[in-house]
Image (spheres, rainbow, N blue to C red):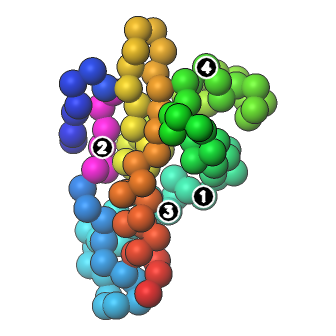
Amino acid sequence: MEKRTGSIELTGAVECCPSVLAAPLDLTESAELAKGCSALADPVRLRVLSLLAAAPAGEVCVCDFVEPLGKSQPTISHHLKILSETGLVQGDRRGRWVWYSINRQRLAELRAAIGT
């Protein structure tokens, strides 16, 4: 588990697995890859990543997801927690709000693992 000062805790920040096409994955590598892919296998979480990627400042306050997603704040928090636990997003608490951004390195690692 990794923790940044002034930020929420992040897990899954370890380097991802090698490409599934390069060699057979071991149990640990396949479990890590499956967690990342599972986090992406939800339409709401994909939309969250899309909104974060399109944000001009590269980050979005948790309160600003409610309207575009049409979901309740607790539901959005649930999805952000899953994305955070797999290391795909990171949150920075500022007062009572948390601002989220994409962990582009983790996303690139997942992309590479399922690519060539």
Query: Where 55 falls versus 20 (above or below)?
Result: above
Q: Do residues under tags 1 and 2 come within 8 Å of each other at their CB atoms?
A: no
Say which label, 2 or 4, has the lower sequence index.
2
Say which label, 1 or 2, has the lower sequence index.
2
Q: Residue at x 37, y 66 (%)?
A: 109
Element under label 1? loop
Residue 31 seen in this snapshot: no
Residue 10 belongs to the span the image colors magenta? yes
Circle number at residue 107: none
The boundaries of the magenta stretch are 8-13
The amino acid at mark 3 is: Cys
31 and 90: which one is in front?
90
56 and 53: which one is in front?
56
The amino acid at mark 4 is: Cys
Question: According to the image, label 1 marks what residue?
Answer: 41
The amino acid at mark 2 is: Thr
Residue 89 seen in this snapshot: yes
Instruction: Name the main secondary structure of what is drawn in magenta.
Output: loop
The amino acid at mark 1 is: Ala
Question: According to the image, label 3 marks what residue?
Answer: 37
- Image x and y of residue 37, in percent: 50, 62
Q: Do residues under tags 4 and 3 come within 8 Å of each other at their CB atoms?
A: no
User: Where's the C terminus, which quadrant?
Assistant: bottom left
Marks 4 and 1 sit apart, C-alpha to C-alpha, by 23 Å
Element under label 2? loop
Q: Do residues under tags 4 and 1 come within 8 Å of each other at their CB atoms?
A: no
Marks 1 and 2 sit apart, C-alpha to C-alpha, by 18 Å
Q: Quadrant of residue 52?
A: top right
Q: Residues within 10 Å of mark 2 (few under 14, many from 20)?
A: some
Circle number at residue 63: 4
**Of labels 4 and 1, the one closer to you:** 4
Say which label, 4 or 1, has the lower sequence index.
1
